[in-house]
Image: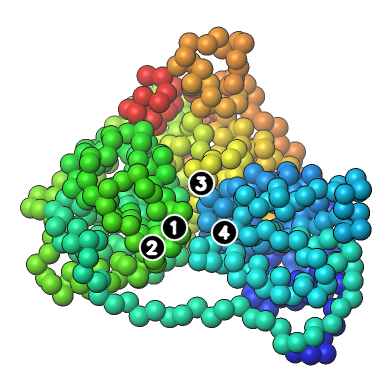
Amino acid sequence: MTGVGKRYADAWSAVVDLLVANGVDTCFGLPGDDLELLRALDAAGLELVPCRDQRNAMYMATGYALQSGRLAVCALGKGPAVTHAATGLLEARESGAPVLVLAAGAPERRRGSGGFQELDQVAVAAPLVRWAHRIGHPVRVVPSTVTALTRAMGPPAGPVYLEVPDDVRTAEFPVTGVRPTLPEALAVEPVPGLPGPPLAALRASRRPVVLVGGGMRHRNEGGVVERFAERLGAALFTTASGRGAVDERHPLFCGLAGLYAAAPARELWSSCDLVVSLAGRLEETAVEGGTPWPPVTVVQVNTDPAGLSAEFPGPRVLGDARQAVLGWSRALEREGDGGEAAEGWVERIADARQAMSEEVAAELARAAALPEIRVAELLAALDATAAEPRVLVQENGLQDMWSYCFPFHAGGGSIVPSEQTPLGFGAAAAIGVKRAAPDHEVTAFVGDGAFLAARADIAVTAASHGGVLYVVLCNGGYGWLDAQRARLGLDADRHAFARPGAPPPAVDQGPGLHCRVLRDKAALTEEIRAARQFCSGGGTAVLMVPVAPDDIAPPLRDAEVVPQ
């Protein structure tokens, strides 16, 4: 009902009613002592994915939001539940994920008295979200929830925090007017790019690069970015979070920028004369760690003012990158004599892609001569056995970063942690990704440290919320830290961040869970096929793969951020 006469038995009933009205069908979380929320979810036919750790609940919700582009909901208790979820809030904010966090709260009458789990939770959450609010009265439940939904979806999208104190959640209240609805999105007809510095820079460029950020997720319908790159004759790169936004099989795609770029791609960067950054933040790993950017004009477009860097010369555009690309493409097509790449630039892009493919072939040949399974072989086997559609969900440790390095993994979608790279994000987020895309093959490519951080939730969800293949690279701890220890010459026994050769983490076998340790290179492909088949039936498969300390992706070695 949307008008006068509706009564709600409690606040959670009202909140869930609004969630249903706005297309939400799943909630992730670990509620507190009050379970009225579960009762309201059951009554409305919404499902709760139960979690054992509030961080993992936030990671799952973030994975769901990034994969689907829709609102995700995460339910928490109060006090320490909120502080425990803070890392997940940070990740959702940096990823631009629309997540509504519903938290319990101490009642107003107990504020300042040292009440049970009393905390100024809004103050904790506010720096980590787009909007944080504590509902002070039952009549504010409906408008506050609508405001939270609106702010979460943006633009810019991001997490919001809504606290429902105990005395508000238990109160019965009527709807005293027409229920507010979410704002309608204005359909904007793309127009030719207006004359000005951005369009002038595009027309003058002869060796351009287009860099696609995470804000282009779900904004590249019809391949508008690829067509724009074709019109410019530009090399096409992504940031880590932008991976999956464009077709990696496109002949202009050259992988990730910065730290994860292969040597031939870095050579392109060193000689470009323009960078067009679409809906990215120009984070550190995208601009450092490899060949430094040349001192060229950088055209930036972002709907979020905070996403427009002041570190680079060139025009900055506050707006929708999709609309900007469509407008610029029309303007360049109309002129017909500008924005064309220099003779030989497209051929250099093709040569770089060919060189990267040859480097992969050489790496696989080296790996074939070694007795143990190498990460490059593992990624090749995963690609060879994968069906479409598919998504690779990644961590950001020393050896799972192989999957960032094009073209060791090609095709399909990708979900990665933001520049914050919290441990365990990918391992837990994969569950949310699968919930968002049940028809996709979902593979989580993670280290053993990340797997341990999410292990309890993986086991809990295996039977009823499975379908994810976990490929766990086992080096006995934290490979990146151990590599830095070795680089500084610190004693391995005193500072044992990793223990190569240690047994893989234990996994409790149970319903819906398949676990294998892979050591036989000859059986690698068949083991992965069997695991994928198990996942296709709704189960969760875990493949543990011991890895050698020296099995490090070439771009990371070339950047000299790990020992040579």
Q: On residue 158, which mark appears? A: 4
Q: Quadrant of residue 475?
A: top right
Quadrant of the frame with the C terminus: top left
Of callouts 2 and 1, the N-terminal one:
1
Q: On residue 305, which mark appears? A: 1
The residue mark sitting in front, 4 or 3, is 4
Q: Identify the secondary structure beneath mark 3.
A: loop
In space, the residues marked 3 and 2 are separated at their CA atoms by 22 Å
Report crowding for label 2: few under 14, some 14 to 19, many 20 or more residues within 10 A (C-alpha): some
| Amino acid marked by disc 4 | Gly
Is 248 drawn above or below residue 351 in the view shown?
below
| Amino acid marked by disc 2 | Leu
In space, the residues marked 4 and 3 are separated at their CA atoms by 13 Å
Residue annotated with mark 3: 418
Contact flag, marks 4 and 1 (Cβ < 8 Å)? no
Q: Quadrant of residue 491?
A: top right
Q: On residue 473, which mark appears? A: none
Q: Residue furthest bottom?
A: 4
Is 362 drawn above or below residue 308 in the view shown?
above
Q: On residue 318, which mark appears? A: 2
The residue mark sitting in front, 3 or 2, is 2
Contact flag, marks 4 and 3 (Cβ < 8 Å)? no
